[in-house]
Image (spheres, rainbow, N blue to C red):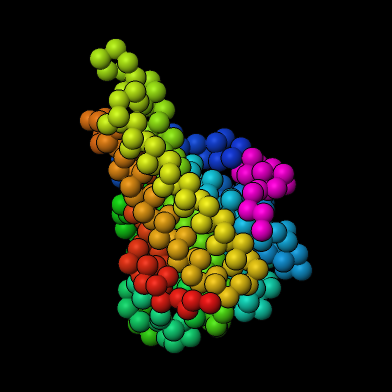
Amino acid sequence: MDLLPTEEQVQIVDSVVDVLTTEFPRERHRGQGNECTEPDKAAMQKIAELGWYSLGLEPELGGLGYGLPEEALLFTEVGRHLGPVPALGAVLGARVASRGGQEALVGSILAGDTRVGLAVIEDPSMDCHRPMQGQFRVLGARGCDYVVFLGRDSAALLEITPDMALAERGCIDATVSLGNLDLAGAHPTFAVSDNDRALYHQAVILTSAMLVGVGEAARDMAVEYAKVREQFGKPIGAFQAVRHPCAEAAVRVDAARAQLWFAAVCADQGRSDAGFQAAASASLAIDAAHRNCQTNIQVHGAIGGTDEHDAHLLLKRSHLLASLFGNLDMHLSDALAAPLE
């Protein structure tokens, strides 16, 4: 099995990086305080037109016909550049709509005309066929038309109607709009079974991809600073107390990236061990992102803990992503519970 990116996949990554650096530069988040800097509908429509949402969808449904590995490469760059998290809601929402036979809705999502928020599921075992109960946190809540719910064995899309109270609130990661959706017995617009857990595995893997990107960005930021910051007449990277943590950050994220690629290929091929590989990918990605962000702040010293520096943006994004589709303990439990063949 060749896990190295092909020339075509490298070209996809390059095109994504070009868009992220020109249209969504990290600098746009600086000096905004707690004000939400999530891209507006026009910006999200632009990336929809570039095919980000349709990359892994079948051509007969309006997709580009690639697969989960290409989507994982795309979302790694989204994570690395602190790109728009609502793109994940659109991709997953289109998959749920396509499985539910909602062709018109699929086309509207892929065109960027319909925005899909992403519900944070506290209990992945929830049955999405049943009426929704309780309060849900929704990422990408600002202006969303639908909310996608993804459990381990089922998924649903819920259309936001005027009588639903989707109250926007502050988020630890101000690059993402967050809303509280209070549901009391609301029926989903439609729900689908996910007995093979293909949708759930896709969600876990794409979230892991963004976490890997965050971990890579934190590693690079720490290493670059260690090269230019001098102390006692030499770069601080020359000292073991700095050099060793940077090396450990590189090893952590390299392992997480390798597991991510393998998990994406396994899920794309429908292998029986896809669940184990997805859980392992999430576990390594969360650990690499969290610990690399901490290393990055430590290497930067006092400035690393200030609002003026970008280090805190990566740390907040890593904690936000780690709360989706189960936490670290849940993913470790899933990996341990997976049958051995």
Residue at image x 45%, y 66%?
A: 279
The x, y position of residue 123, in whole percent, is 36, 76
Q: Is the magenta stretch mostly helix, strand or loop?
A: helix
Q: Is residue 19 visible in the rendered structure shown here?
A: no
Quadrant of image for the N terminus: bottom right
Q: Is residue 322 magenta?
A: no
Residue at image x 36%, y 72%?
A: 333
Residue at image x 27%, y 31%?
A: 241
**Side (left or right) of 31 relative to 301:** right
User: Where 282 sits versus 231, above or below?
Assistant: below
Which is nearer the eye, 92 or 272? Answer: 272
**Side (left or right) of 266 relative to 166:** right
The x, y position of residue 175, in whole percent, is 40, 47
Residue at image x 63%, y 44%?
A: 13
* Residue ranking furthest to the top: 233
User: Where 224 sits versus 326, above or below?
Assistant: above
The x, y position of residue 135, in whole percent, is 32, 73
Which is nearer the eye, 143 or 242? Answer: 242
Residue range corresponding to the magenta coloring: 1-16
